[in-house]
Image (cartoon, grey):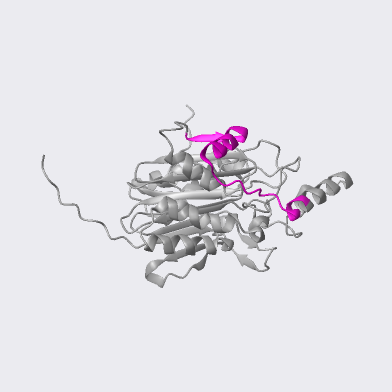
Amino acid sequence: HDERQITEIMAPIVVVATWPFSEPAASTAGQLLQQGTAVCDALVTGLNVVELDPETGPYFVGKGGVPNNVGQLELDAAVMRGSDCQFGAVGAIQGVATPCTVALELMKKKSECKHAMLVGQGAGTFVHEQGLPCDDPMTESSRKAYEEHRRQQQSGTTASTATTAAGSTAPGDKMTDTLSILGVDAQGHVAAAVTTSGMAFKHQGRVGDSPLPGCGLYADDEAGAAVASGEGDQIMRFCPCFQAVQLMRQGVDPDAACKQTLSSIRQRLKRSGQPMFEVVLLALAPDGRVGAAASVRQWTDHVKGGTFNGCPYVVWRCDDGGKPTIQTFVQPDVDAGEEPQGAGVFPKASHD
């Protein structure tokens, strides 16, 4: 057969993640990518740093996260590899603080388990079968958060004032802050990963957008990768990550792809008389270009303090000295006509 000379693409190593508390995850993943670690392994190891830190649990991630409506901590996570579009996910898994590790193992063990997604007790069984770590994510702070929620329910206080595991108002008005991360290695391979405990005091068994391909994440080396965060029950209606990657496949810049996707969603909702929901969308091209868009106009960190005008996210670049920087997307004034036009992702239906 003909021998072909393979020239490796030396792309800039870039990691992008939602929300400022993702800095440790982005830094860890970026450093591992510099050492040649496979992109999915690097991203998941970075997420593990945050998942195992009870101090970041109040952001709805891993150990110390926020329980459901019956006091259980059910976690969702997913990983997607762009080189072959392989995917692994778990939903409503209990008794595990690092669900993204389970999702990665599921993606890698297709010869032993042909499924791409496991939920609830079945996901827990897989953990035991594979001998994966079982570190109970529930902490005393998690239990106190649930007890406070129950007291507020009994007194008639609305859920929006419920406290988190840190004993303070939840980050974000809708109390949802999925940790989502994207990465590209020196060969231009992209990947996406997400981890979350989901909406505060959600119904038992609820699974949001995070572990659903195309909704909470999507990755394809031939186009790029995208992740989302926000109101999962609304996000899953529109598959924004798949839409953004498809636009990138057509040659649209990652930043424009994010903006056009959200613009199209907003326009579709408007035509049916529905308000826009909370959503953050990040995208990453195989050549290291980054894109972002969000409906979030302000984000307050009630755990560490501080308010951002706009939606903050973290970018780590090897060519920037390997230090994470917090960038902010500021939503244009839609009422003033500043919103970027959509690209027909959800074209208006024709009624003859």
Q: Residue at x 59, y 54 (%)?
A: 51
Indicate the quadrant where residue 91 lies: top right
Which residue shows up at 40% across the image and 40% down it? 86
In the image, farthest residue toward the top: 352
Instruction: State yes or no: residue 67 in magenta.
Output: no
Q: Is residue 77 visible?
A: yes
Give the camera-side residue of 108 and 119.
Answer: 108
Name the residue at the right extreme.
Answer: 155
Look at 64% across and 59% down and name the residue there: 56
Q: How many marks?
A: 0
- Please tell me which residue lies in front, 236 or 13: 13
Residue placed furthest toward the left: 2
Instruction: Classify the position of the N terminus by image quarter.
Output: top left
Query: Residue 117 at what x, y percent from top left?
Result: 51, 35
> What is the residue that sits farthest to the bottom in this orientation?
321
Residue 73, percent across and down? 68, 45
Is residue 338 visible in the rendered structure shown here?
no
Return the residue nearer the eye: 346 or 99: 99
Residue 249 location (% of width, % of height): 34, 46
Residue 285, x across and y down, in percent: 37, 54
For residue 133: magenta? yes
The boundaries of the magenta stretch are 116-143
